[in-house]
Image (cartoon, coloured by chain):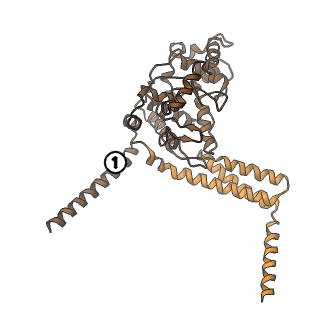
Chain colours: A brown, B orange
Amino acid sequence: MRISRAIASVVVTIMIAALVAGARPAAAADTIDPDADFKAFRDYYTERFPNVPLNDFVNGPYSMDAELRKQWEAIDDFPPYDFAIDRGKQMFATPFKNGKTYGDCFPDKGTGIRQNYPYFDDKSGEVITLELALNRCREANGEEPYSYVKDEMASLTAYMAFTSRGKPFDIKIPNDPRALAAYQKGEEYFYARRGQLNFSCASCHVQNPGNHIRTEVLAPALGIVAAMPIYRSEWSGMGTMSRRLVTCNSQVRGVPLKPQDELYRDVEYYLSYMSNGLPISGPGTRP
Amino acid sequence: MRMQICLAATCWLFCAGAAQAASTEADFKTALAAAVAAEQDAGALKNQWIPTEQALAAAKKAAAAGDFDAAVAQAKEAEALAKASIAQAKEQQTAWKAGVIR
């Protein structure tokens, strides 16, 4: 009798524990808590890849695969993005028709500020990425905006990233319901499945970093934005964060959003916040 | 009896074939309108699929060539794909939370 009571007691205890454990993620998921998300995100990668130094996550697939890393180190003797840095530097210094320059639109004349983007603008109530800020600077000075995906925009962001190399991401999420909503929309976009292949960003970059998809080694989401913009062999050229998001959507057979769509900016905000403290490594090289 | 069955089967095949071959421009327009409406709904959810767009383009191309059987078939395919993308988007409005690192 005592034994059966004891068994019943253990069973009830396990059931209650299971209910409590089951309820916790749901409750957490309904609360917007960037700090808790940040800690869980960081712990997930550092526990899963204990041999990868924290700052090395910014090197994406090269932090996951030794052979790939050797190839990258060889390529980086003569980095294929060098021409973009030079071009961006020249563009950055060239005045607009009205005599002003890009530097006039940014804090610290635009040097060494990449790590602070994207930010939440409390006046307009939206997330401002570096790409968006550059085009708004052009338009404010009477110039036509550039394509967001490559060429001039990639060159400008390559130069600006280069001036921030080694500086840690410092993304702020103010205690403003609009900023928190943007953060959560970005988080949702990252985890929601889409496209005919029914993949989310997380399917590759959370569940499968280090694994192969065809010949590619998948990068971890931690630090994935730090190397932007990148020279991709697959593209035979430079591409921006916008280009990366557009091609990710296409690869899962989803119709991409327009570059710099609000949701793309929100997901960049989310991923950049998750990378806080990691060094800017852009511009980068990827297979 | 066998003769009757064969005759009935032949008639059914003929009728089915005739019915299939009878797709008209009006049928295509109806099928296309349904597909386009569904794809617009998917667009409002920011979750359109590339194969849906491809099927819509194929339907219009077939119609332009006068092949309304193929045009209707492609439009119906597009509608089915668009509805699948809508279902995916609606399901993911809550399901995404299950994948979040906690």
Outermost residue to the left? A2
Position of residue A208 measured from the top left corner of the image (x, y, whole percent): 49, 42
Kindly identify the amino acid type of the residue bearing the numbered disc 1. Arg
Outermost residue to the bottom? B1
Q: Is residue A205 above or below residue A101?
A: below
Name the residue rendered at 53%, 44% in the picture: A200
> To which residue does mark 1 refer?
A24
Q: Quadrant of the N terminus of chain A?
A: bottom left
Q: Report which quarter residue B19 is drawn in.
A: bottom right
Residue A93 makes an appearance in the image = yes
Dot 1 crowding, Cα within 10 Å, few <14, some 14–19, many 20+:
few
On the rendered structure, is A153 left or right of A163? right
Q: Chain of mark 1?
A: A
Name the residue rendered at 85%, 53% in the picture: B65
On the rendered structure, is A99 left or right of A191? right
Residue A260 makes an appearance in the image = no
- Dot 1 falls on a residue whose secondary structure is helix
In depth, the one of A15 and B90 nearer the eye is A15
On the rendered structure, is A32 left or right of A139? left
Name the residue rendered at 67%, 24% in the picture: A151
Q: Is residue B30 above or below residue B52?
A: below
Q: Quadrant of the C terminus of chain A?
A: top right
Position of residue A159 measured from the top left corner of the image (x, y, whole percent): 58, 17
